[in-house]
Amino acid sequence: MAALCRGRHRWRRTIHFRVFTRNLTGKYDYDLVVIGGGSGGLACSKEAAQLGQRVAVLDYVEPSAKGTKWGLGGTCVNVGCIPKKLMHQAALLGAAVKDAKKYGWQISGTVCHDWPTMAAAVQNHVRSLNWGHRVQLQDKKVKYLNLRGSLMDEHTVKGLSKAGKETILTAKNIVIATGGRPKYPTNIPGAMEHGITSDDIFWLKKSPGKTLVVGSSYVGLECAGFLTGIGLDTTVMVRSIALRGFDQQMAALVTDYMEAYGTKFAWQCAPKRVDRLPSGDLQVTWTDTQTGNEHKDTYNSVLWAVGRAPETKALGLDKLGVKLNKKTGKIVVGADESTSVPNIFAFGDISEGRPELTPTAIKAGKLLARRLAANSTELMNYDNVPTTVFTPLEYACVGLSEEEAEKRHGKDGIEVYHAFYKPLEFTIAERDASQCYIKVICEQGGDQRILGLHFTGPNAGEVTQGFALGFQCGATYSHLLQTVGIHPTCAEEVVKMNITKRSGLDATVTGC
Ligand SMILES: Cc1cc2nc3c(=O)[nH]c(=O)nc-3n(C[C@H](O)[C@H](O)[C@H](O)COP(=O)(O)OP(=O)(O)OC[C@H]3O[C@@H](n4cnc5c(N)ncnc54)[C@H](O)[C@@H]3O)c2cc1C
């Protein structure tokens, strides 16, 4: 114990000495230390290094409750956008194989999906991205440290290795980009013991089998979508509404399509407990919140998609007085990503009120680096951020939902143009296109500035990315009408819209 105390004093002396010398010389080990090597942290550190700063980035992955771990690159690369999109693609190919027969492809025998083949391919791709990130950091002269970072003061970071070894780094500026992790419900017996989350699903070596997805956020629906698409018996349990925060008419189209596609939905139901049966299966008990009746069913896997929590607890922010939002636990930031403590900045999923998306984290990180390293004054514009939900029928949008537009402008202050269209690809395949829909919400009057654009259909993200540029430039309904379509595409339906919701006319697109 005495030795331990002596050790502590020695360590304290070292810190004080460091702080003292730093104050005398004004020198730090680094110009910038970034905690978190995800989408945002990597972008920020690389940009700062390219601008001549001495930069270190700390990235450390705490294994999931199930023990899943992964490499450098954060959520997007390892347990988010990338493996999700690849598994979504696996599911789309399944649907394409069915279509292919109608297009003349002779496919003999039954077509079935092999999880281990898909998982190995996806995981190998992710590993190649992990490696690519390491190489990029090296090329750009960013020091990468596989350490868990916490703050000691506004210029000092403590890094802790897996083996418990401490490294102290000083920096002129510190950036926190530690993202978030999926939550488990705390009041459901067996939830954590027997369940998995999006931190595990992409790294499973064996098929999850019959799966209950609890939660209908975009993460829940996307996972349920690709599981259904590769042929697994999949149920989504929804307590209240699907895709909260998104336009609810569009959310209904997405879930209607999924129901027709084979995903089961347990609407207005709340899980009560999860038990492992002697067979190894999981028995889930839930309550129908409308009738109060209790139900049970067995599954091979239960995937919790009930939200994400920020990674702030282990960072030592309270000691430094970095202000957090008490409800969300996220870091309160200014328009310039500054926190309540000078020299400490935060952005990406860890920061309050920001979209939880990779492109916003990357862009915010680059702009912050330019402000810190190159006297730039450009701030991140968080308005008009487009996004896509990669469900079996993809949904993409930019701008306001109809509900939000009504709230801000009044029902009479907006004009909504809409169209139900049939993608040409669906015709020969005899696919149902009932949920392929476009909605453009405009300001009433004048040139009718576009307030929101919503699209369900094939390649929704690709379609909407282009329109997002127009949106950013202040596109109006008149601009849409002046735009010539590309034929035959789904996107051209956006520039052809002429039926308003107010008119009550049939919005089904007919003819070419
Ligand atoms: C299933 C899923 C699908 C998604 N799909 C999309 C999509 O299609 N499109 C999209 O734009 N976004 C998507 N996202 C969201 C996107 O992944 C995040 O918004 C993005 O990764 C946030 O970047 P970030 O830099 O803030 O944090 P992260 O990418 O989460 O990176 C944070 C890093 O910091 C590390 N870390 C945490 N604490 C410490 C510490 N104390 N010391 C050192 N390192 C630490 C973490 O391990 C992690 O590596 C998805 C997310 C999920 C979960």
Image (cartoon, rainbow, N blue to C red):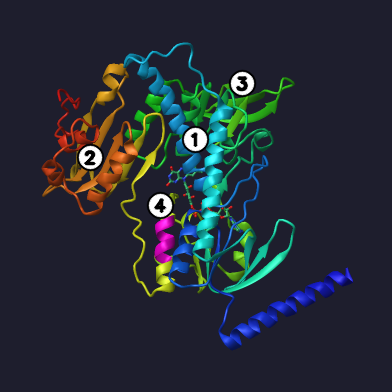
* 139, above or below 130, in the image: below
- Residue for badge 2: 440
Residue 288, percent across and down?
53, 25
Q: Earlier in the sequence, mark 1 or mark 4?
A: 1
Classify residue 106 by image quadrant: top left
Q: Earlier in the sequence, mark 2 or mark 1?
A: 1
Residue 62 horizontal side relative to residue 375, left or right? right
Question: Quadrant location of the N terminus?
Answer: bottom right
Task: Decide if ligand 1 comes within 8 Å of the CB at mark 4.
Answer: yes
Question: Quadrant location of the C terminus?
Answer: top left
Residue at the outermost right position: 2
- Residue for badge 1: 220
Measured in 3D between alpha carbons, the distance from the residue under mark 1 to the one under mark 4, in whole angstroms, is 21 Å
Question: What's the magenta region?
Answer: 362-368
Q: Which of marks 4 and 3 is nearer the N terminus?
A: 3
Q: Main secondary structure of the magenta part?
A: helix
Which element carries disc 1, helix, strand or loop? helix
The amino acid at mark 1 is Gly
- Residue for badge 4: 359
Residue at the outermost top position: 109
Res. 498 in view? yes
Which element carries disc 3, helix, strand or loop? strand
Residue 239 horizontal side relative to residue 203, left or right? left
